[in-house]
Amino acid sequence: MVVKVARFTIGGEPLWGIVDGDEIAPLGGTFVSTADILRLTPAELKARAGAERFAASSANILSPVTAPAQIVCQGLNYADHADQSGHAPRQTNLLFMKAASSLSGAFDPVIRPAGCQMLDYEVELGLVLKRSLSAVDHVTRGTLGDFIGGLVLCNDVSARDVMFGEAFLQWFRGKSARTFCPCGPWLVIPEPDEVADLLDRIEIQLWLNDELRQSAHTRDLIFRPETCLNDIASLMDLSAGDLILTGTPGGVILQATAPLGQILTTKLFKDSERKDAIVEEATAHARYLTPGDILRAEMRTDDRTVDFGRQLLEIVDA
């Protein structure tokens, strides 16, 4: 059994509910965080749904992943993205963090920070933990469902000029602005024994202004979820409700070029020169996200039996 859980408002405090077609059935009980939701099984959640129904279109859909939460991200985890970034083949798992305050809803605007000239998209599958994970744990494909409670569509929005132009390559700063982690529209919660199978058959796509830019299948992940969880656990502790982004496929706006590589290597310690040079080179060959652009992202299983929903995001200026 798979259930879809939405977090939403209809003129009041945030509510949680089961998504049933075009309607949402509010859940009985008190749920403060995503971790609270993931303490219950899909059957227990369905049993909490009352007879009342709201049209999903009438609700303000919020991120189903709540702060505070650690957001740990994998980079260059699809072969085509690694190749387009000049980092193929991958030998080690690239990990970085995003701030929890970057979480936003699937239909909220994405705010381009003042001065940002290279705003980019990264559609991704997100994994939400339902229990703690530490150095004493070892995850296998067969035990993924003991740790992963929910799956969710995400977008790892990125300010590339900050990531590669600021002093010593500021990835956290370039990934963590508010609204830089659209999440949802809902959280898909499977039974534990369904998790591994689901993770093997997910398709993910993103369009910019109705032009398909990214399309991938989770079978193409380089470092599988169990490998990633063990890698993270060797470094740090995670808690229920924490979010792991599994990497974006190829098709992002920023593409590796020989001139960009030369700028990074020759101007690594020349902060005042590097950013201007990167922006000049990168924007000469591509148009980055600007106000009015619309991002549409979708995720589903390849047999269409499980739909993770659609994001519709407009870019606006700060």
Image: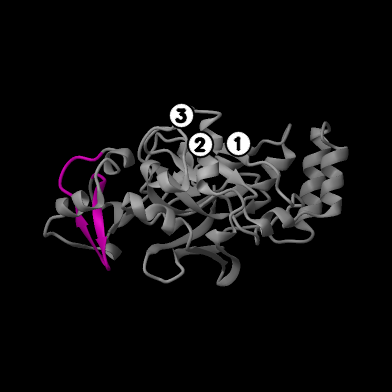
Q: Which sits earlier in the primary sequence, circle 2 or circle 3?
A: 2
Disc 3 is placed on an element classified as loop
Residue 229, position in %: x, y? 50, 39
Number of the front mark, 2 or 3: 3
Q: Can residue 177 be seen in this view?
A: no
Mark toward the viewer: 3 or 1: 3
Res 99 label: 2
Quadrant placement of the N terminus: bottom left
Q: What element carries label 2?
A: loop
Residue 25, magenta (yes or no): yes
From the viewer's perspective, is 58 left or right of 73? Answer: left
- Three-letter residue code for mark 3: Ser
Mark 2: amino acid: Ala
Q: Nearer the viewer, residue 27 or 118?
A: 27
**What residue is pinned by disc 3?**
134
Q: Name the residue under label 1.
A: 172
